[in-house]
Amino acid sequence: MTNKQQSAFFLLIVFLFACGAGLLVYRQYDLFYQEKTADGLAAANLQVRPVKQKTSAPTALADGRLQVDSPKEGDTVGQTFNVSGYAQGWFEGSIAIKVLDDNSKLLYQGNTIAGDNYGHPAPFNTSIVLTATSTTLTGKIEFNDYSAKDGSLVYQKIVNIKFSSFSSPLLAPRSFSEGGTGEAGGGDISGWKTYTNSQYGFEFQYPADLYLKNPKNFKFHYYGNGGSPPLVVLESTKQELLRTTGVLPPGAKPGVNVTMDGYDITVDVEPNPQNLSLSQLSAGLQADATSVLDVAGVQGVEYFFGDAGGYNGVLFVKKGLEFYIDIASGCEQDCSQTTSDQQQRVYRQILSTFKFIN
């Protein structure tokens, strides 16, 4: 190897060594930087947030016209709530909306716009403010499309809903004076009987055609206090006929609506060892709806349940005790059965005669 070749080889070795050393220094610096960066992020409590994925619009609607995302079927709504979803094929994107209760009382009427909805679904979202109070626990939202030619209804979608509050002639808040005479429900009560309970110090009147039952023999199926029987049970004539004889009332079908217009009114008194307030006790009921109702000069809370046949009652606190007075349909097989207006009037007449005697 000549001197020139040796010199070139030596320079190559030096060059490679320098490159290797440079790479090593860079790697060490990079590791040092990453550690410091991680420490800094941790000290600042910084986190990498995942990217929120956008919900894509549907490419097609089940019925080709409307998809309601909110509220869903059976949802509970307040006085103000949002309606949203997707629409397709609506003239100028205009969707007519009505909110009605089960008595067909109009609570809201207006329109929302779905925008460009020809050939593909377009979103809609609008705020509904009810202009009246429902008279029933349940109701519906109508989404209507009318003909531009003659105004006839060409499409309708209905979403059934529940109302968080309602006021009806039978369930409206009212006050029953102590020792009343039954005027709240109307009708003559001169032939009514009187029930007196000296242990808890109260009495009330009730129609002569209601049977005062032994609570131990009462089929106790719709209360939430562990299944124990109530203190007092009043049972309607048809309910009594079925229980004592097994004979179905006229018009009843075996296994379906077997109690016809039978109903029960019960009174229960329970201790309140934790001294819970009326609001705490009523919240624990988890009722579908509540309102203020005074009985015998004591403020109470009326509660209403729409499931399992439907029943309502009133809760109030007196002398450190919890008082519950309920009315329920005699639901045995057909638990969609509910109490009638007349039965509710009788119930309210009984409440109006309730009084404390010591």
Image: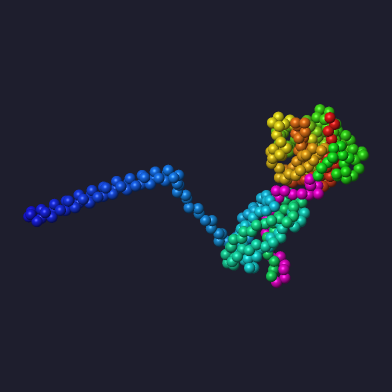
Report the span colored magenta: 149-173
Q: Quadrant of residue 64?
A: bottom right
Q: Is residue 305 above or below residue 89?
A: above
Q: Quadrant of the N terminus?
A: bottom left
Does the magenta run of residues contain 323? no
Residue 240 visible from this viewpoint: no
Q: Is residue 53 above or below residue 284?
A: below
User: Which is more toward the observer, 125 or 102?
Assistant: 125
Q: Residue at the spot x=10%, y=53% of the render? A: 6
**Horizontal and vertical percent for residue 188?**
91, 43
Q: Quadrant of residue 290?
A: top right
Q: Residue at the spot x=75%, y=34% of the render? A: 322
Tally of marks? 0
**Horizontal and vertical percent for residue 323?**
77, 35
User: Which is more toward the observer, 268 or 172?
Assistant: 172
Q: Residue at the spot x=45%, y=49% of the render? A: 48
Q: Quadrant of the C terminus?
A: top right
Residue 175 visible from this viewpoint: yes
Residue 203 relative to residue 80: left or right: right
Looking at the image, the residue that sits furthest to the top is 199
Residue 191 relative to residue 228: left or right: right
**Horizontal and vertical percent for residue 98?**
71, 59
User: Which is more toward the observer, 290 or 277?
Assistant: 277
Q: Residue at the spot x=61%, y=60% of the render? A: 124
Does the magenta run of residues contain 161? yes
Which color scheme does this rendered protein use?
A: rainbow
Q: Is residue 203 above or below residue 304?
A: above
**Horizontal and vertical percent for residue 85?**
61, 58
Looking at the image, the residue that sits furthest to the right is 190
Q: Quadrant of residue 271?
A: top right
Residue 15 relative to residue 230: left or right: left
